[in-house]
Amino acid sequence: VQEVRDAGMHLMLADEFYDLGARAALEELHRVVRPPVYVSLDIDCADPAYAPGTGTPEIAGLTSRELVQLVRGLRGLPIVGFDVVEVSPPFDSAEITALLAANLVYEFLELIAAERPPPEEGAAL
């Protein structure tokens, strides 16, 4: 962790996120992020109760509600792309990890679509 910070990267651990809360964590994120923004969301940051279908489940991770709050809280950032990684179907009981991942992808797509300028009148879509 310290090596990452010493290299000048910003890192927020799950415990730090929990101590701050979603709103303050998002304020910090908006403060330090510089464009262009590419977001990589590793599903194993979610608690295994919400995302068991990953190769490296982490106990005491984020809830699905917190993850949705975080993605929605990225509104206004110049996001150029995103990915949701580490979903492992063989470990996904009842497909709840896939459902969470699909919903997070939807939330990312909605963010990107909301930032697109409206088409000019009469322009082909």
Image (tube, grey):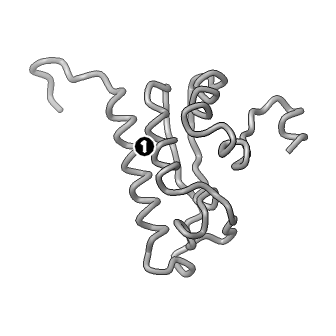
Left or right: residue 44 versus residue 121 is: right
Residue matched to label 1: 108
* x, y percent for residue 114: 32, 31
Which x, y percent locates residue 104?
A: 44, 52
Amino acid type assigned to the residue bearing label 1 in the image? Phe
- Seen in the picture, residue 5 relative to 119 is either above or below; the reply is below
Q: Residue furthest top?
A: 121
Q: Residue shown at 69%/42% (left/top)?
A: 19
Q: Residue at x 67, y 68 (%)?
A: 57
- Find residue 101 and report its horizontal and vertical position in percent: 46, 59
Location of the N terminus by quadrant is top right
Counting from the top left corner in percent of width and height, residue 66 is at 52, 49
Residue 3 higher or lower than 33, as above or below = below
Query: Which quadrant would the C terminus be assigned to in this image?
Result: top left
**Which one is nearer the viewer's eye here, 102 or 67?**
67
Residue at left offset 62%, top offset 30%? 29
Left or right of 2 on screen, residue 118 = left
| Viewer-side residue, 80 vs 22 | 22
Nearer the observer, 90 or 11: 11
- 61 w.r.t. 112: above or below: below
Q: Is residue 14 left or right of residue 113?
A: right
Q: Secondary structure at mark 1?
A: helix
Q: Residue at x 57, y 79 (%)?
A: 91
Numbered circles on residues, count: 1
Tell me the crowding category of disc 1: few under 14, some 14 to 19, or many 20 or more residues within 10 angstroms, Cα based: many
